Amino acid sequence: MMMVTAANTHASLSLDVIQTILPQLIVAFGIALALILVAWRRSQRTIVLFTAGVLTTALIASVNLLAIQPTVVTQLLKVDSNSAFAFSLVLVVALTSLHMSYQFLKNHIEVHDEYYLLLMLLVLGAGVLVTSHHFASLFLGFELLSISLVGLVGYHRESNYSVESGFKYLVLSASASSFMLLGIAFIYSVTGTMSFDANLPNDIYHQQNLRLFFELGILLFISGIAFKLSIAPFHFWTPDVYQGAPTPVTSLMATVSKIAMFVVLVKCVIAQRYMLHGNLQLLLIVLAIASMLIGNVLALKQSNLKRLIAYSSIAHMGYLLIVVIVISGESLAFTWQSVLFYLSAYVVANISLFLVVASLQTQCLTGDRVVKHYQEEPVLNDLQGLFWRTPSYGLLVILAILSLAGIPLTMGFIGKFYILSQATIAHAWWLIITLIVGSGISLAYYLPIIFKLFEVEPEGGNEVKKLERAVIEKVLVYSFIIIGLVFGVFPDVVSQFIVS
Amino acid sequence: MTLTFIMVTLFIAGILSWVCENRWRGSAKWCALLVLTLLATVFCIFVVTANHNFESLTVLSRVSWIDTFNIEYSIGLDQLSIVLIALTWLLAIICVLVSWQEIKHKAGFYYFNLLATIAGIIGVFVAVDMFLFFFFWEVMLLPMTAIIAIWGHENRHFAALKFFIFTQVSSLLMLVAIIATGYFHLLQTGELSFYYLDWLSLNLPLSLSQYLMIGFFIAFAVKLPSVPVHSWLPDAHTQAPTAGSVLLAGVLLKTGAYGLIRFVIFLFPEASAQFAPIAATLAVVSIVYGAKMAFAQHDFKRLVAYSSISHMGFVMLALFAFNDIAFQGAIVTMIAHGLSSAALFSLAGMIYQRIHSRSLADMGGFWQSAPRMGGFALVFAGAAFGLPGLANFIGEFFSLIGAFQTLPIFAVIAAFGLIGSAIYGMVLFQTSFQGLAKQEIIDLAPRELMICSTLFLMLLVIGLYPSLLLKFSFGA
């Protein structure tokens, strides 16, 4: 034991090991530099460019790691190709969200340096989470992520909802993390180790006297994670916070935090072999079925786009939970592939939707005069006729919605194919049936969105709404359209990155 | 290669006509018509000059597509798919012609959707890989739904939604069955495969295959449609624009029958034989129920829609009778129904253009002002109730004779459907063209005359000389 530790300590100093956590280091270093930058010169443009530079460098470093062999960095972190892929995804999303944030904040006179700092902290938290290999690093990442999100959620002070949603998120998030901490403590008290790599003996799961303790620990731990993933019945905060937070922040919450938390959940479940425990499986099945049904049913009557996406995200996490439920020791690579593919499909679709929603909110009205205005509540009717107004945006929304609904030609379909394959192999028929019912219900709110896009705009509206389009935004829109289509038709392009 | 070229060209031509319409108003329909005619010719030349006789499924190209799941892009043809694709071409051209003056709003995008639907339908008929089949199966739905949702009548969104949800949910069941069969192949041979010909050699135990069969059956029964999953059809047919109804009734329903033949009966022969009594019951209920409901309708298109349910019931009954005569009958019925329902829906569209109503209450006495249209209406209604000399008669006659050999009671009950069809056919004709003249309408224009006479001619040719179709075995 001592020797292993010594070897690890020694290894942590070498350049190779540093290289494996380079993306996280770049972000961390970037945060420190950004603080200095803020002291030196306060300018919106500078800090945005700086953040973009840091994130891009980290992205390049992270993409380089895609083919890496699993490497343990100290006891806390373990970098492998899955975590590198997840972190690259996080960085891509963060870059897109950065653009949205800039569009959102640039009209303010105030300089918002701290916003970008929080954004980078959030990314760092996600980076720690996806590579965590120990409960300590898990908790560290979890808290970094939560606290920076709390700051971001309540950021838009002029908004009617900022206090409400900020507080809601703060209180619930804090209690979730304390539950999780208690759960970790219970688990530790039984297993005696915090590492994910402990190779616990099988009988530890079946000791009668400790069983209750252990089960309670897992329950608390899972509920903490389920809160972040907004899995029913821990979902109540989701629609309110999604609605109240500024759209760029909502997009981060819907994507970055979901990627990081799900990856870490899969890691825990695989490493600690909780699945040997029958009761946990039952718990997860109940959570998955509840999420699929509750999310889809509650989304039916939403007219606010952000609330609708919130409910649909609940359902999607339910779908994805199926993969975790049917994990088996033999096909871990396939499990990772399914999870990461589904997450990428989900994330691309969500970020595309938020991109459009954000630009609808900050659209300018060109009539006799050009008026900048920020629309607080993006509703379904705002999409009316979008396909005829600005076809590229319309196409992007259509692709994103079809992807969420799991219709072929899109990544979402391949993701669903992965999940159904997993579930079929495991003979999880009840989960499959729930998934089919859930997708059936989901069409009833996804399709009307598409129909709305095709509707003719009401005649006589003298203010012709035209979307203001920066060059970067155009590039983003077209690249997401291409990503959605190409990866949907040729999923091997993505899969080859994920295959470890 | 040629088939891929045809599908890709259809899609590109769709985009092209969309662009053209934006540049020169009214050019999209010409573009679409031209491309469809050209590609139909290419297809005919390809089939005639090919050195296969297509008696069994001939794989024309096979390229690996998604390696992760060992999925291939493989397409092939046999007599069954050739006949159905030929029907698709004919109806596609008719669709363009019936939309000629009906579609004014966003015409470019309309023709894009129309051509994309046709590309998808052809894909369904040629796909040999099951994943590819499912891919096309869904892809053809999207533009079809768009056609209903954008250019349909007053209640179009509801109809499109219902249509999409019904087909989507049922096809997810099929997807699960596809995946399960693929993984069963993995268990049995050590290789994951979605290749249809691999599956044919698979040795499925009955206990498993009956569940898989039901997964496929439900998807195709929804498309066919069969009672009790038919309720999307009257709405979708009624609300769709004329070309949408023609395409739905003419070809899309046939993809359900095609699927039943190729994937339910050929892949799971034992399981479907076991399932035959249930399927036959559903078929007979569809026949009688469809006829009864058709009789009670006041909406021209809704009446024809219910009659479709009745006619497709004959197809299902014949398919589950498991003999050659019935099988031939099923195929002739499919083609005949494709032609006759397309004809009736086109007629409905023509009347709608003139009086802006689909209600039978607003019609009556049109014969006086439009005798040519009346004549065609009489013939097409006659075709629908199986008038000897027209194609439907051959199809239904063969279906019933074949079905009588194995399922006599079902065949006897199904024969009552013929009486029902005579009643609703006559109701349709009498209320619209006879009686007091409620309005005066303009008689058929040359373009419409061409549509009607082409369909009539096809019905007549098959009706008088059925060997044209019967000489093929269709892989039976």
Image (cartoon, rainbow, N blue to C red):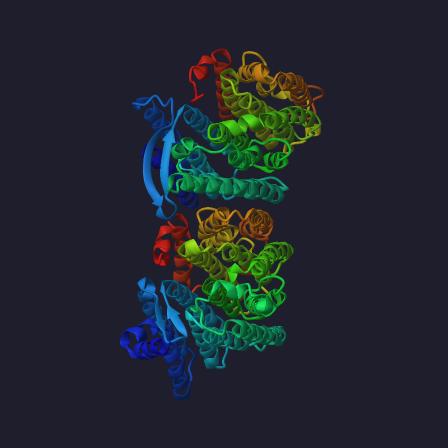
Instruction: Give left or right: position of A118 versus B358.
Output: left
Instruction: Give left or right: position of A242 versus B12.
Output: right
Q: Residue at x 52, y 47 (%)?
A: A427
Q: Is B370 or A229 nearer to us in this picture?
A: A229
Q: Position of residue A170 (x, y in %)?
A: 59, 76
Within the image, what quadrant is residue A337 found in? Answer: bottom left
Vertical arrangement, residue A476 with respect to residue B78, above or below: below
Vertical arrangement, residue A484 with respect to residue A176, above or below: above
Vertical arrangement, residue A398 with respect to residue A58, above or below: above
Q: Position of residue A278 (x, y in %)?
A: 56, 58
Q: Quadrant of the N terminus of chain B?
A: top left
Instruction: Give left or right: position of A46 versus A377.
Output: left
Within the image, what quadrant is residue A496 found in? Answer: bottom left
Q: Is A497 or A117 nearer to us in this picture?
A: A497
Within the image, what quadrant is residue A295 found in? Answer: bottom right
Vertical arrangement, residue A233 with respect to residue B289, above or below: below
On the question of residue A261 being in view, the answer is: yes
Q: Quadrant of the C terminus of chain B?
A: top left
On the question of residue A369 being in view, the answer is: no
Q: Residue at x 40, y 45 (%)?
A: B19
Q: How many marks?
A: 0
